[in-house]
Image (cartoon, rainbow, N blue to C red):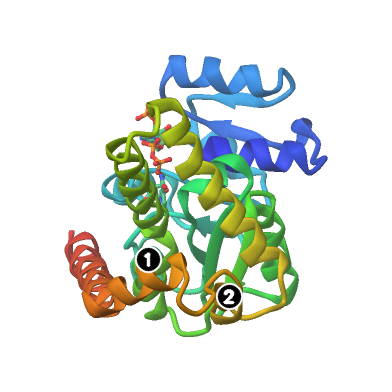
Amino acid sequence: MAAAIIAGLLRAGHSAHRILVAEPSDAQRARLARLNADLELTADNQRVATDVDLLVLAVKPQVMAEVARELGARPDGQLLVSIAAGITLASLQDWFGANAAIVRVMPNQPAMVGAGMSVLAASDAVSGPQREQAAYVLAATGEIGWVEDEQLIDAVTAISGSGPAYFYLLMEILEDCARDMGIPAELAGQLARQTAYGAGMSATDSSESLKQLRARVTSPGGTTAAAIESLEKDRIRDIVTAALEAARARSVELGQEQNND
Ligand SMILES: NC(=O)c1ccc[n+]([C@@H]2O[C@H](COP(=O)([O-])OP(=O)(O)OC[C@H]3O[C@@H](n4cnc5c(N)ncnc54)[C@H](OP(=O)(O)O)[C@@H]3O)[C@@H](O)[C@H]2O)c1
C-alpha cells in the first residue's frame, strides 16, 4: 500500500527528493528503488520520522504499537497519516500523544492502479492545511472522501475497503458461467473483466443514478430483465446486505481486538 502511495505521488509529479521511506526489508527497499532512483530509502524509522511534516504509517495493524513505541511523541506541527485497518484515532493518540495531529485512512486495493477509494477521518488537532496535505497524498492514489464520525470507518471498510473482492467474485462467476456456456476460456475472462471495467467507467463518468444506468440496459421483457428478475426473486439485495453487515461487524470486532493490545 505504501508503494501505491509513493507511485501515485510520483505520477502526480511530486518530487522523489521530497519522499523518505523507512522499510526494514532489503528486498523491498530494492523494489522501491526501482520506482525512482531519487527516493531516499532507509531501514531507520527515526531517520524518516524526524524532519518531515507528514508521516504516513503504512505498517500492518499488529505492528503499529511497536512502531509507535519506537517513534514516541511527535514534534509539533507534524501530521501523522495512518492507513492501518482497525487502528483507531484514540489508540494512535495514546501512543503518539493526545494532541497529535492524526488522520486515519481506509484505502482500498485499486490504489495500486491509481483507482483507489480512500476515506479519511481526522483528530481534533488536525488543521485545515493539514487536511489538505492528507487529501493531497491520498488523492494521488484515486478518489477521496472524509467522514467526521470516525465510527463510520467500519461501514466504509465493509463497502469500499473490502468492496473490490465482491466485484472480483462477481467477475469470477461471470467468467465461470461464460466457460460453462461454451465460451473459450480466454474470451470468458476478457468478457468478465472488460464488462466490469466498462460498467465501472460508465458509472463513474455518468451523472445518471446507478438505477437509471441499469434501466438503460434493461429493456422490458429482454435478456437483462430476465436476469434481474431472477436475481431479485432470489433476494440478491438481502444476500448482499447480510454480507456487508457481516463485514462491518467483523471490522468492529477486529478493531476492538487491535486496540486492546
Ligand atoms: N492492502 C490493502 O488492500 C489495504 C486496504 C486497506 C488498508 N490497508 C492497510 O495498509 C497497511 C499496509 O498494508 P499492506 O497490505 O501494504 O501490508 P504490507 O505489504 O505488509 O506492508 C507493510 C509494510 O510495513 C513494513 N514494516 C514492517 N515492520 C515495520 C517496522 N517496524 N517499521 C517500518 N516498516 C515496517 C513491511 O516490511 P516487510 O515487508 O519487511 O515486513 C511492509 O513493507 C495495513 O495496516 C493495512 O491494514 C491495506
Query: In terms of secondary structure, where does tag 2 sit?
Result: strand
**Disc 2 target residue:** 146
Query: In terms of secondary structure, where does tag 1 sit?
Result: helix
In the image, ligand 1 is in what quadrant? Answer: top left
Q: Residue at x 55, y 60 (%)?
A: 117
Residue 96: horizontal and vertical position, in percent?
43, 61
Say which amino acid is labelled 2.
Answer: Trp
Badge number at residue 63: none
Q: Mark 2 or mark 1, which is nearer to you?
A: 1
Tell which circle, 2 or 1, labels the residue nearer the N-terminal end.
2
Residue at mark 1: C-beta within 8 A of ligand 1 = yes
**Left-right relation of 83 to 245:** right
Say which amino acid is labelled 1.
Answer: Thr
**Disc 1 target residue:** 157
Q: Nearer the viewer, residue 108 or 36?
A: 108
Q: How far apart in space, not on screen, are marks 2 and 1 (Cα)? A: 13 Å
Q: Nearer the viewer, residue 157 or 237?
A: 237
Residue 144 appears anywhere in the view: yes
Q: Residue at x 20, y 70 (%)?
A: 246
Q: Nearer the viewer, residue 91 or 113?
A: 113
**Left-right relation of 258 to 123:** left
- How many numbered tags mark residues here? 2
Q: Nearer the viewer, residue 103 or 2?
A: 2
Dot 1 crowding, Cα within 10 Å, few <14, some 14–19, many 20+: many
42 over 2 or under it: above or below: above
Residue 24: horizontal and vertical position, in percent?
42, 25
Q: Quadrant of the image for the C terminus?
A: bottom left
**Left-right relation of 226 to 33:** left
90 over 138 or under it: above or below: below
